[in-house]
Amino acid sequence: MEPLGDRLELLDLKVLFTQDGAWRHGTVLPLKSRADDALLAGGSVQHTIVVRRTGMDVAWFEGDRWYHDLVAPARPGIATSPVDDPTAAASLPSDHPIAAIPLAHRGGQTVSILHGTATMLAGAMAVHRRLRTGGVFWCAGDIAWTVTQFHGIYGPLAHGDTVVMYEGTLDQPSQTRAWDIVARYGVESMVTTPSVVRTVRGWARELPEVSELPSLRRVTTAGEPVDDELRSWLGQAFASREVDVVDAWGQLELGGIVQVAGGGGDDVDAVPDCGVDIVDAAGMPVAEGEAGEVILRLPWAGTMVGIEGPQAAIADAHWTRHPGSYATGDLAVRRANGRMDFLGRTDDVVSISGQLVSLPEVREVLADHPFVEVAAVASRKDPDLGRSLVAAVSLSAEVGPDPDLDGVAVELMDTVREVMGGLARPRAVLVLDRFGGGLGQLELSRAMALLATPDRAGTPRRVTWEQVVAAAGQ
């Protein structure tokens, strides 16, 4: 519960909302219990508001309140205080914070960005005009994903659309759940990540009984690049006629999506122009086919309004690197058809299934484990997630002279998952005899990705430093 405790301490909250529990992968997660554990470290929280969702037993402490008790109407005959209407909306400035969202690792510091209420809604509503087709709208993504919060809930509701929300994962109670949701509610437009689409495609190969879904008209992918093969499959898999498939790009600091490409329809240019360009280190536009950093030359309404935590590095990264423009930190190349292909980040952060994961933070978690002497982390292409992590470690004397490498790998992977979540969990662990010299970070990362490819059996496996050097030269 360390990450949640750190977040609570950073935000200086007075009230925390949670549930007794929540369903995921067919089991119940004890959310109230986890919140209680995080609050044991202290902090400013005075009241915990609990939604009764599963009916499971929960511990009760001073300051805990049931949500249904707080919103229950007063019983007839009980006097109420002569105050203003408690249901009236509060009058707040347009940039009053509506969300504080943590960034991936920033030099060992916990940093969150703040989004304003009206500013975020302005961006979300402008983008929603491009994502919708007029009917029921569904964002098939985790609620922690910024796109789900802003473009799956706030934007469509502010626009007056009907929104589908679901609990759990798309493989429970069966792997037909995505089809079932679209069919049951007549979903016309949906947003999701390419990783979710890859997973559903794998299920579809084993589900010949899945029916066509004529209601679905448009699917938007966001959070990571989508390849042409996956885009083609997606355009034909769910419906009796070809679906309009569009590709969206944005980032957390900008409030989610800011650009939508592909597809057809009269609203293809509905998203306001944010002046997207690709430039070199000097801020000059690069030629077609050359890699550079993506910048925004025009203001965007949904841009963050503040930062919680150390601010100097964040301000420098976004606003001072290319004066007069917003520097995103994303690397991309522009193709002949005008489409941008994203290549990664300028920092040690990688997008996995639409979520940013910090390589230094994963490395620190591994290095803090008593089994590990030295650790390194790299990313590689992944057929399911788009990209995933691979770790290389040299072991400490704590594991003994003849350790069970499978057991060690599982222990290290589970430790990362416990601290940082499942997407940060390395998919493979290489055990090195030592970390030598002669390789830069890029060379080491390339060698790790090559040695830990899925078609190489024996992961976790023992690897010598000489093998790493040889792989870096391939």
Image (cartoon, rainbow, N blue to C red):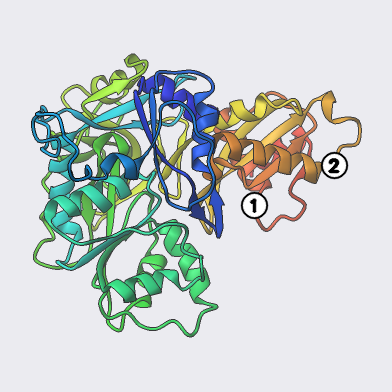
Which residue sits at x=69%, y=37%?
412
Q: Quadrant of the C terminus?
A: top right
Among the 4 quarters of the image, the one containing residue 134:
bottom left
Among the 4 quarters of the image, the one containing residue 67:
top left
For residue 453, the mark is 1
For this rendering, which residue is in front, 344 or 412?
A: 412
Q: Is 254 displayed left or right of 30 in the figure?
A: left
Q: Is 240 displayed left or right of 125 in the figure?
A: right
Numbered disc 2: secondary structure: loop
Residue 282 visible: yes
Q: Residues within 10 Å of mark 2 (few under 14, many from 20)?
A: few
Choose the circle earlier in sequence order: 1 or 2. 2
For this rendering, which residue is in front, 219 or 62?
A: 62
Q: Quadrant of the N terminus?
A: top right
Q: Residues within 10 Å of mark 1 (few under 14, many from 20)?
A: some
Which residue sits at x=52%, y=28%?
38
Residue 341 image position (x, y, % from top left) = 34, 50
Which residue ends up furthest to the right in the rendered image?
A: 401
For residue 94, the mark is none
- Image position of 466 with respect to 10: above or below: below
- Image position of 262 with respect to 413: above or below: below
Q: Which residue is mark 2?
A: 404
Dot 2 amino acid type = Asp
Dot 1 amino acid type = Thr
Among the 4 quarters of the image, the one containing residue 104:
top left
Which residue ends up furthest to the front in the rendered image?
A: 77
Residue 224 image position (x, y, % from top left) = 38, 50
Residue 185 image position (x, y, % from top left) = 28, 72
Which residue sits at x=37%, y=65%?
228
Residue 284 image position (x, y, % from top left) = 22, 31
For this rendering, which residue is in front, 127 or 187?
A: 187
